[in-house]
Image: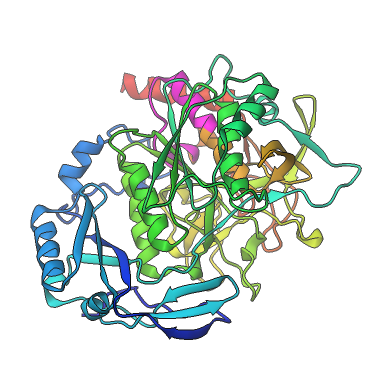
Amino acid sequence: MQLEGSERAPVPGARRLRPVDPAERVEVTLVLRRRSLPGEFPDVVRIGRRSPPRREVLSREEFALRHGAHPDDLARVAGTLERHGVDRGRVSVGGRTVHASGPAHALERLFGTTLEYWTGPEGTYRGRRGALFLPRELEGVVVAVLGLDNRPQARPHFRRRRLAAATDVSYAPPTVAAAYDFPSGTDGTGATVGVLELGGGFSSADLTSYFGSLGVPVPGVTVVSVDGATNAPTGDPDGPDGEVELDLEVVGSVAPGARLVAYFAPNTDRGFLDGLTDEVHDPTNRPSIVSVSWGGPESDWTTQARSALNAVCEDAATMGVSVVVAAGDGGASDGVASGALTVDFPASSPYATACGGTRLVLRGTTIESEVVWNDLSAGEGATGGGVSEAFPLPGYQNGVGVPAAPNGFVGRGVPDVAGDADPATGYSVLIDGEGTVVGGTSAVAPLWAALFARLQQALGAPVGFANPRLYTPADEATFHDITSGTNDGYSAGPGWDPCTGWGSPDGARLLRAWTSSSANLSDG
């Protein structure tokens, strides 16, 4: 049986080098179906704009029992792998994943494919063409198989300032937080923020120097290795180190009381899935907020990979874990060569809070002006945003004016919220020992993660899946509405728009709205 959504094509411009050695060891992740009965899994995205927020959330342990992989399915997979000469590795019951490894020839036979080496614009990778096929005993049990193809899957969404103009400014992250009126008397104490990284690393010396310069306590960062990836700085501030240190420095300086956990995974679709799964279902560190600043155009993902990652974001929503994701830095086309309008994934997941970008000009900590970030004409990027062609319009976006996607699909609108992202008004950070200014929506996701950490402290409970709340009239009034600018595909305007969503936050007003909402729920 063909595995639905597993079709793969070579990277554009790549050429075939040679077949994979039949004895080469290959590692894969199998994603299994949920054990829930039909209609039993809560559909949190169908909550309407005027519906109250969900109050019931499941613990990780409860979730695994109700909605994790069924023991019978795990036994069936284990038996099938053994019969085909493939070793079973670690299992995540809640995440519904089974890791497996074996010689290439055994996995080729098991999944009906041929593995080859290719070389292209981003280097050499192991790839496959066409669809995968499942043996009869796994039909309906396994919903995705990732790892046979190990091409680089995502890119970080940060931009170092390249051009210097007389009008350029930069801000320490706490200055931006003050301009957005993050709740006073809070520092994120009690919250745990997980950041997902697909390469690079950080140095303790950089963190000590950076936080010392701000007069902020140096955070302790717990490192979690996924699929063999580690905290491995490259020494190149233009490489993935820039993403790692940006994430930690923004969250750590804006919410210094929060606990930080960095999950390092390989930059493949398997690595992305395993990293996010381990983060969301982590029974030890238990992050209440997950920040993701990596992604790629929806069309770059197989349907099975998109579905599997979206399901992890859905798991998070059901367990009360916030997932904030950068909306991309390539404007409305997300940087695709054809220039066609598309959105970035996983920002387009209806279970993630997608973060777009603005150009923020301050006088002290007072907002002087704020418009859509768009420096595409100077080669400096622009905020992502638009309409998904993969995920339908969620209930919470009904009536906010999300346009049809370019192909006519009634899809999920991106982003939900925004914040400062223009490198010309960027964040002063330290990367690989070098003081620099960085922008991009990669800075906005950790900024919102820090805001959620401070709101968690003030509310006495995790924020959880925020989108249904953010789309209620009371919350709409808490934003700085961005009404000027475009992302070369869509224009800003009053209310929600596909450039900056609702706009940038006023944290104190958001806290008042959520405090009132919580009181009303308690009274009801």
Is the residue 378 above or below the residue 456 in the image? below
Tell whether 380 sits left or right of 194: right
Asked if residue 80 lies left or right of residue 522, the reply is left
Specify the color scheme: rainbow
Q: Residue at x 54, y 56 (%)?
A: 402
Residue at x 39%, y 41% (from the top left corner): 224
Residue 55: image quadrant is: top left
Q: Position of residue 49 (x, y in %)?
A: 44, 43
The N terminus, quarter of image? bottom left
Q: Main secondary structure of the magenta part?
A: helix
Give the image location of residue 208, x and y in percent: 61, 27
111 left or right of 403 in image:
left
Q: Position of residue 171 (x, y in %)?
A: 74, 33
Q: How many marks?
A: 0
The reply to whether residue 478 is in sight is no
Image quarter of residue 518: top left
Residue furthest top as drawn? 185
Q: Residue 480 colored magenta?
A: no
Magenta region: 450-470
- State the quadrant of the C terminus: top left
Frontmost residue, 446 versus 21: 21
